[in-house]
Image (cartoon, rainbow, N blue to C red):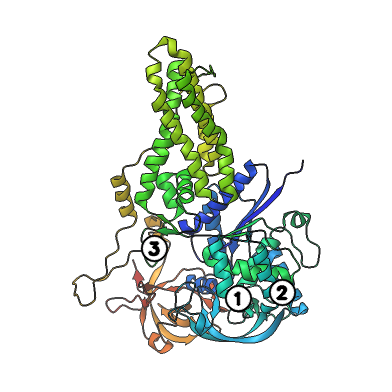
Amino acid sequence: MEKQKYYITTAIAYTSGKPHIGNTYEIVLADAIARYKRSRGYDVFFQTGTDEHGQKIELKAEEAGITPKEFVDGVAGEIKTIWDLMNTSYDKFIRTTDADHEKQVQKIFKKLYEKGDIYKGSYEGLYCTPCESFWTESQLVDGKCPDCGREVKPAKEEAYFFKMSKYADRLIEHINTHPEFIQPVSRKNEMMNNFLLPGLQDLCVSRTSFQWGIPVDFDPKHVVYVWLDALTNYITGIGYDCDGESTEQFQKEWPADLHLIGKDIIRFHTIYWPIFLMALDLPLPKQVFGHPWLLQGDGKMSKSKGNVLYADELVDFFGVDAVRYFVLHEMPFDNDGVITWELMVERMNADLANTLGNLVNRTISMTNKYFGGVVTDKNVADETEKVIDDDLKSMASQLAAKVDAKMDGLRVADAITEIFNLFKRCNKYIDETMPWALAKDEAKKDRLETVLYNLIESIKTGAREIASFMPETSERILAQLGDGKVTEKPEILFARLDLEEVMKKVEELHPPVAEETPAGEETDAAPVIDIEPKPEITFEDFGKMQFQVGEIIACEEVKKSKKLLCSQVKIGSQVKQIVSGIKAHYTPEEMVGKKVMVLVNLKPAKLAGVLSEGMLLCAEDAEGNLALMTPEKEMPAGAEIN
């Protein structure tokens, strides 16, 4: 009998920077679902990847002094490393800079244009650069972007638009007749009431104000706008071809069984994406699940707030499976979850070290002590004991069905709770049967062996079910319990942690940020900023970098850029051309005559088509204001900085 297919995707991660634990939660959640489906006999295809185009990335690359491709290569590599660190079993990692994806996006754009669904016009509105979204005045919240709360700026440009309203009624009907399509239900109500029923505006699907994107091949000054590019990864990644030459894999896998995404991008996946698919005459995905956010103690994670937690850092403290357990178990179905160091330590000690780890350890130890590591089912129990045994056996035998019921509704945290309920019942069973007391009576030896057999089999049942969520832990438990004989020396699965010691190490990693002084109060202390520390370098590493004092003798704006200034910098007897993203902070006139600190031996790179032969050093405050670093005393151009 052929296996039933199951195609699951995550949202592709935006390559603007290193993903924090809230971003990482999604790939772990998708992995748990994929592993569960495989365990139930499904033929699973699990796709994830990176979203790599857009204005924000172009600007970040300019700031870093590298090309956009070099920038996204670095970040995509970092994202993939974290996904692998978390032991996620994806089958494909797609990048939107992949040549086959870019080719199909161009073909899709052209097909929709020729069909009349895309037309050329111009856009004038309020634009949020971080979200890469246009908004009308009525859509703003307190005058700011409704998605991220940041400032928006007026923008006008020629653009291509998609006729969203053409398909709106058809989408409304689909949502109404497919109640499982958008989950949880609260997300469905939000989409219907806030966007679809009031009427859809046509969607901007190209841009001309930046170059880092997939060119519209028949109008190359335009690049395909982010959502038409990014969303189509779900079909291009499995072999969709716009000319009707799609692969067998596409024919098998599409439609997707589950798009797993964050609640903040539910609109794009339940309105824009289904409409694009309708225009391409393709079936819609079976389900879109908008999961809640994982918040850090004092709110949404933000680098500017200094409350960002990263998966690799947490793994260093707790281990991969402990972090997987925490993010999966602590996230409610449709409300935001919370992660703190203190809560992690509490769960580590109570759930993992005690409930699970100690259970496995003492069961193996007693089996070795009393029976040399081998027990069989003697099935010895009096009437009272039989009630206790049957209760444990019943709970173990029903576990798979209980997990199925929870996972069918994507209630992953509840499925894990069911498994740990069995482990807790095993601990209670030990307290009820008191094996150490049975061991004192030779006449009770068969009863003791029965108890230990029941324990081992019940723990094995739980270990097999926990494999989807904590795969390494499952393997370690089953390996120790063996097939007929337990290991001679039990391995500690999870070590208890001392909260004070953990918090001390955390403070060393993240020194507390100075609190702001309330308005009206004076303070003698200068404001400070703590940034995420970079890896230590040696003196030899530092010695490879050449810093000198430079004098800016000329400066002008870079015409193709909104952020760049091009300076001619005298360094000794040489003059170097240096491009810097500081136009918002200095005019060309202000720059001329300044003595500045220069990284001289940086590999030359082109920014907005202009060659840059070094880097000017700047300081940046919490609001993003920049200040050039200048020598305290008068120094000649070319003076070495040690």
14, above or below 442, in the image:
below
Secondary structure beneath label 2: helix
Q: What residue type is labelled 2?
A: Phe
Quick one: label 2 or label 3, which is nearer the N terminus? 2
**Cβ atoms at labels 1 and 3 below 8 Å apart:** no
Left/right placement of residue 402 relative to residue 302 reads right
Task: Name the spot of residue 67 as percent of width and height, x first.
Answer: 56, 70
User: Which mark, residue 109?
Assistant: 2
Residue depth check, mark 2 versus mark 1: number of the one nearer the observer: 1
Left/right placement of residue 162 relative to residue 10 reads right
Residue located 44% across and 16% down the image: 370
Q: Which residue lies furthest to the top in this view?
A: 443
Quick one: label 2 or label 1, which is nearer the N terminus? 2
Residue located 53% across and 16% down the image: 378
User: Which mark, residue 299?
Assistant: 3
Dot 2 alpha-carbon crowd within 10 angstroms: few under 14, some 14 to 19, many 20 or more: many
Q: How far apart are marks 2 and 3 (CA)?
A: 39 Å
Q: Which amino acid does label 3 sit on?
A: Gly
User: Which mark, residue 197?
Assistant: 1
451, above or below 239, in the image:
above
Q: Distance between the residues labelled 1 and 3?
A: 32 Å
Residue 602 in sight here: yes
**Quadrant hosting residue 123:** bottom right
Task: Name the spot of residue 622 as percent of width and height, x first.
Answer: 36, 71
**Residue nearer the viewer, 67 or 176:** 176
Residue located 42% across and 87% down the image: 587
Task: Name the spot of residue 585 as percent of width and height, x first.
Answer: 40, 82
**Quadrant hosting residue 511:** bottom left
**Residue nearer the viewer, 13 or 42:** 42
